[in-house]
Image: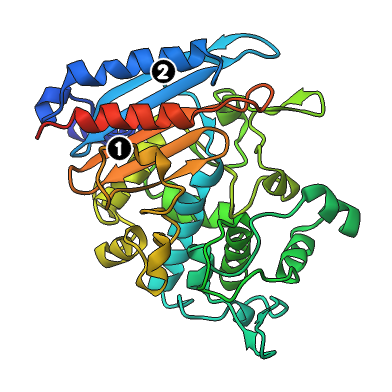
Amino acid sequence: MKNFILLIMILIMSVSIFAQGLPKVKPEDVGMSSKKLDQIDKVAQKAIEENKTPSVAVLVAKNGKVVYKKAFGYASVQPEKKLLTDDMIFDLASISKPIGTGTSIMMLVEQGKIRLEDDVIEYIPNFAPFINKDGKKEHAKIYHLLTHTSGLPDYTNADSVIAKYGNVANDSLMNHIAQLTKTHSPGTNFEYSCLGFITLANILKIVTGKPLNEFAQENIFDPLNLKNIGYVPNEKMKKKCVPTEKINGEVLCGVVHDPLARLQKGISGNAGLFANLDDLSVVAQLILNGGEYNGVRLLSPLTVKLMTEVYKRVERFGRGLSWDVSSAYMGQRGDIFPIGSYGHTGFTGTSIIIDPVSQTQLIILTNRVHPNGKGDVAKLRKSIANIAASAILK
């Protein structure tokens, strides 16, 4: 009986430890400089003092171990001032694209349910083609959506969609996106497009019968035992959420900032994920490990390699499959992290960099849009990236 109770206690403790994220060690234990990493403090504090953002949360990990995790500033300044802690949950904005949508779509590819070469019209029959000068129809493929080369424009105005369809359902938005005039022949131009990832989420729902939030929860976050990442935060998560912008007199908190994602009640392919440093770092480590973390495998090493390297069919644009590798949008890499590192940014002020050579990940979470949408963390991201990269000594 005693042995049985001891076994249960060990299991509970192991689950608890697992849920807390990566283990923490001294930087020197994994070949990094604590003195250099401490320079992040001054850079973060300066950005807050200059009103670039009310808060900054940073995590640096190497070899699967956290070497730096700190929070600075205020989670909120309206309607009340509240200090930020390093376990608080942020609106990830477009980091949702690779973490939620991209990972889910590539799971379907691995399962043989879709192919990267499939035409989008196989799943969205009214998805308008590009009409070339000879009048020939050119159809976008799934890999075009994942690399922002489908010909879709970058965005569409949420208010105009409401005006057109009234009480907008997800089908109405997809119908609107599908019929938009394509700006170029698929694969010939890069135009960063939230609409392409909204389309991917709709394809996933058509193929699996499940909305993106349910699929990602069941196939990514639950297997990893993560409690502080997901779409449409529950009441427990909301208590730890960091607010974003004040919209129509109300500060958004636990409600997605992106207008098109808000139109879809927070379940969207382009945005909608919320997470804290610890849970996001676990998913990042899974990708860094080639699709496996702590004995849980979600993707194959070959799939992760395909996602995180420049996709050959559209090589000149520097994009992987949902991840950014070397496009003009990869400025958060800074000056020192090498080409071959990959990542993504989010409109709310979030960013992630993963360097497979040094086995390092850097996560920066801010709510630079709080409260008036005017913050700017572009310089901050680069400065912290340079500090983190320079701290790698081995």
The answer to whether residue 150 shows anywhere in this view is: yes
Q: Which residue: 73% across, 78% down?
A: 126
- Percent across and percent down for residue 251 are 72, 24
- Percent across and percent down for residue 158 are 78, 49
Q: Which residue: 10% across, 26% down?
A: 29
User: Which mark is in front, 1 or 2?
Assistant: 1
- Percent across and percent down for residue 22 are 27, 34
| 303 vs 19: above or below | below
| Quadrant (top left/top right/bottom left/bottom right) for the C terminus | top left
Classed neighbour count for the residue bearing mark 2: other residues with Cα under 10 Å, few (<14), some (14–19), many (≥20)? many
Asked whether disc 1 touches disc 2, contact meaning CB atoms under 8 Å apart, the reply is no
Which residue has dot 1 on it? 335
| Quadrant (top left/top right/bottom left/bottom right) for the N terminus | top left
| 256 vs 289: above or below | above
Classed neighbour count for the residue bearing mark 1: other residues with Cα under 10 Å, few (<14), some (14–19), many (≥20)? some
Q: Residue 223 vs residue 191: left or right?
A: left
Quadrant for residue 45, please give it. Answer: top left
Which residue has dot 2 on it? 44
SS at badge 2: helix
Q: Amino acid at mark 1?
A: Asp
Q: Which residue: 27% across, 26% down?
A: 387
- Percent across and percent down for residue 353 are 35, 41
| 349 vs 240: above or below | below
The answer to whether residue 228 shows anywhere in this view is: no
Quadrant for residue 11, please give it. Answer: top left
